[in-house]
Image (cartoon, coloured by chain):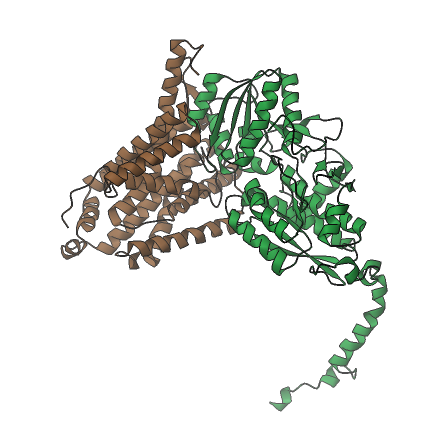
Amino acid sequence: MSSDKIDADKLTGGLPSPLRRKLLLGMAALPAIGLLPRGALAQALPTDAVNTTKLAVTDSTVKVGILHSTTGTMAISETGSVQAEKLAIAQINEMGGVLGRKIEVIQEDGASDWPTFAEKARKLLVEDKVAAVFGCWTSASRKAVLPVFEQYNGMLYYPTFYEGLEQSKNVIYTGQEATQQILAGLDWVTKEKGAKTFFLIGSDYIWPRTSNKIARKHIEMHGQKVVGEEYFPLGHTQFNSVINKIKLTKPDVIYASVVGGSNVAFYKQLKAAGIDLNKQTLMTISVTEDEMLGIGGENIAGAYACMKYFQSLKNPNNEKFVAAFKKMWGGESVIGDVTQAGYLGPWLWKLTAEKAKSFDIDKIAAASAGIEFTGAPEGYVRIHENHHLWSKTRVGRARTDGQFDVVFETADLIEPNPFPKGYQ
Amino acid sequence: MFEGYSLAELGSIFAMQGFAGLILFSVFVLMALGLAIIFGQMGVINMAHGEFMILGAYVTYLCSNFISSTAPALFPAYFFIAMALAFLASGALGMLVEWAMIRFLYRRPLDTLLATWGLSLILQQIFRSVFGAREVGVVLPDWLMGSVAVTDTIEVPINGLFVMGLTIAITIVIYAVMFRSRWGQGVRAVMQNRVMAGAVGINTEKVDRYTFGLGCGIAGVAGSAFTMVGSTGPTSGQLYIVDTFLVVVFGGAQSLIGTIASAFTISQAQSTMEFFLSGSTAKVLTLLTVVVILMLRPQGLFVLKVRR
C-alpha cells in the first residue's frame, strides 16, 4: 500500500542516498592504509625475483600446505601438530608474513593411510604448487611421500622424532633423529639407575625396530644386556602375555616404543598387573603429553620419557608459547614434543626464505644450513647441513597430572647424526 | 629363557600365563557374543559392531565424569551404573538402526555389509565431532585397579577377573534368554523359518528389532568393560572388529556354543604362542591356523543342523 512506502530521504534527514554515504565512508578510511605494516604494500622483493619456479606466490600471498591425519588412528597424535603449525602461521602473518606476503594454508587429510599421504602430497605440489609443506608424522607416511617430494622438488618440514637413516634435500627434519633421542637417555638411565638389563618392547613397524636396533647396539657396546625384544602389531590391545614375560625376566629397565592406541592398553594393563612404575624403571621414547591424555596420568606416573621438549620446560620462550597455544586452542590443551617441533617448521621456513630472499625450493634448500631460531620453545635450535636440527635432549618423569618433571637435560646441543657408524 | 628359575617360580609364571589366556578368552567371548547373536541368528553382517562397543565406552566416560563431579560418594560403584547405561544406550541405538536401515536388507547380506560399513564410518565421525579426535581417558574406581595376590608369587589383575566374571554372567543370561524363555524360542523360530514363524503368530519384526538391540547392547557392555584395558577414541572400534568376526566365523556362524569354543581356541593359541614367540609371529601363526581350518571346514567348528 502506498502509505507504507517510506521516503528514504525523509528518514535520513535529507542526507545523500545510502550508496553515496557508503562510498564517502569508504573514502574516509583510505588514509588508514598508512597505518598498515610496511611489508603489506611496499614490495621490496617483486614476485618474479622471489619465485622463479611458478610456485603459488603472488604480490601479497604465498600458499603452503599442511598434510596431517585428521581422521583415522593417527588423528590422536597429529592433531597437535596441525594446531601448532597453524599457531605459528597466524603469528607470522600478524608480523607481516614472509617476504611481505601473508601465508595462506591449504590443509589436506592424510587419513592415517600412507598411500593417501602420497596422493595428497602430489596434489599439493603439482596442482596447488605450494611453497612448503608442513606434514607427516609416522615414518611410514614420510617414506610414502619422500619420492613425491623428490620427484616434484617440494620442501617438507617433518616434525616427528624418528629413526634417522635418512637425509634429503627436500626435507627438513625438525624432530630428533634416533641417536639424539636414544643415546643420551640410555646413558642417563645406566648412570642414574645402574641399569644392567633391558627389555625392549615396541610396535611392529620401522621406527620401533630401527630404534631398538640402535638401542641394542648401544646397550651391548657398554656391556649391558638385552633380555627381551618383543614387537606387536599396531592396534594390538592384549599385552598380558608379554607382561608375564617381563615379570619372568625382571629387567632393570623396560624400554618401550609402543605407538598409537596400543600405548593406552599397554600402560593400563601394566598397572593392572601390579607393576609399579615407581619401583620398576620404565623408559619410553614414544609417550608425550598428547599420549598421556588417553593413557591417564595415574597409569604411567613414574615412567621416564626421552624427548627434546616438555610442556613444563621453564624458559621465557616456552612460557609465551604455551600461553599463546592455550589462548588459540583452549586452556585444556596439552603440548607434546612433536607439537612443538611442528611449531618450529613455519618459523624455520620463514627465516630460511628471508635469508635466501626467495621461495624457490632449490634456494631454500641451499640456504637452510646454519639457520638459527632463538625463539624456539625448547630454547635454541640450528639447522645442520644434513637438514636435521642441533638441539638438546631431556629426560622427563611422568606425573599423575599428565605433565612431566624434567630430571635431566644435556649440557650442550647434540649434533644430529642420521647415519651413525657402528649402529647399522 | 627359563634358566635360573626354581620350579615353583616357573609354576607361578605358567599359572599367571594361564590366567592371561583366560582373560583373553573372556575378552574375545564378550566381543563376539553380541556379534554372534546378530550375525549368527539373524544373518546380518554388522560392520559397525566395534562402534557400538565404543559407544558403550564413551557412555562410561560420560558417566565417570558426571558422577565424579556430582556424587563422588557413588564413585566406587559407578562402573555398574555405567555398564547398565551402556547396555541401554547401545541397545537403543541398535534398535533405531534396525528400524531405520537393517529391516530393509534382511535377505541381502552383502548389502548389509556395505550399509553397516557406511554406518560405522558415520558413527566414527560423530564420535570425532562430539568427543574430539583425541582419545579420552576413563578414570577407574580404585578397587578395579592393581592386582590381587592369589598366592605369594601369583598375581592376577583385578580387571581381568572382573572381565571374566562379567563374561560368565552375560553368557548365563544369554543362555537363559535364548534357550529357556519363550521370547528366545521365538527368536530361534524366526531364525529357522521366518515365514512359518510369522504364520504361527510370532511378530517377526518385533523379534528382529529386539534381537538386534540385544546384540548391540551386549557390544555396549563389552565396550564399557574394555575401558579398563584399552583406549577409547573415535576409531578404537576398528581394533576389535576383525578379531570379533574371526571368532564368530571360526566358531560356526549360527552357533553360540561354537562362538565360545572358537574364542577359547583362538585365545589360548594366541596367548601361548605370544609367550614363547614374539607378538607379531603369534598373531600370524594363529591366523594361518584359522585360515587352514576354515579351508578344510568352511562352515566353522560347530554347525547346527538346520532343515532348510
Foreground residue, B141 or B128? B128
Which residue is rendered at x = 73% and y = 63% of the image?
Answer: A58
Q: Which residue, as the protein is rendered here, is positioned at the far bottom? A: A2
Chain A, hue in figure: green
Q: What letter labels the chain drawn in brown?
A: B
Which residue is rendered at x = 63% and y = 38% of the image?
Answer: A166
In the rendered structure, the answer to whether residue A298 lies left or right of residue B55 reads right
Q: Which image quarter holds the N terminus of chain A?
A: bottom right
Residue A132: x percent and y percent?
68, 52
Placement of B36 over or under B12, stated as above or below: below
Residue B47: x percent and y percent?
37, 49
Foreground residue, B63 or A364? A364
Residue B238: x percent and y percent?
43, 44
Foreground residue, A293 or A409? A409
Placement of A369 over or under A394, stated as above or below: below
Residue A191: x percent and y percent?
66, 17
Tell me if I can see residue A302 in this picture: no
Q: Quadrant of residue B60?
A: top left
